[in-house]
Amino acid sequence: MLRSSVSRRRLLLRLLQGAVLLPLGASTPRVTHASERQDVHFIARTLELARIGSERGDGTPYGAVVVSDGIVIAEGWNRAHLKRDATAHAEVEAIQAAARVLGSRNLAGCTLYTNGGRPCPMCEGAAYFANVDRLVYAHSVDAIMDAGRPQLGGC
Ligand SMILES: [Zn+2]
């Protein structure tokens, strides 16, 4: 168990190289879902998107991906500065992109991954209304949290 946690932490830290936007923690990772390897992979992608978007000056350092059947179907990062739009959060960008990909506003069966703490009420509300099945966020580099079904006003 401990060995697995240490290994997971090393993997996560390796994946996060270059993601300077989150503080490095000293504790071991905490992944709370059976698909923890996928969770680490997809959270790492959100961190990469956050870094890329922030370096481009598009917005604050947040990234998000929507996953269906183990495949990233949409990505987004905060573009609030670029679009001069306070609603252009990473999660909303990813949800909108996923809806375009699927040709439907119903994202049942999808998981929304995002970096940082639990999404803001607007973003979690968007995930709720999009019928996202599962919300996973990286509270920090050493803790991935599975929030389950998005809640309306549950932040
Ligand atoms: Zn938000």
Image (cartoon, rainbow, N blue to C red):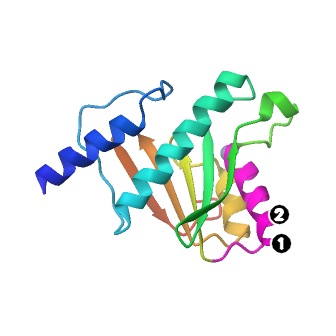
Q: Relative to the observer, which residue lies in front, 49 or 32?
A: 49
Q: Which mark is residue 100?
A: 2
Q: Which mark is residue 88?
A: none
Instruction: Give the residue furthest to the right.
Output: 84
103 over 39 or under it: above or below: below
Say what secondary structure mark 2 lies in.
helix
In the rendered structure, which segment of residues is drawn in magenta? 90-108
Q: Quadrant of ligand 1?
A: top right
Report whether 52 appears left or right of 22.
right
Residue drawn 57% across the image and 65% down it: 71
Across and down, in percent, residue 42 comes to 50, 53
107 over 42 or under it: above or below: below
Residue drawn 45% across the image and 46% down it: 138
Disc 1 residue type (three-letter): Gly
Q: Which mark is residue 103?
A: 1
Residue drawn 19% across the image and 44% down it: 6
Across and down, in percent, residue 104 comes to 81, 73
Report whether 27 appears left or right of 102.
left
Disc 2 residue type (three-letter): Arg
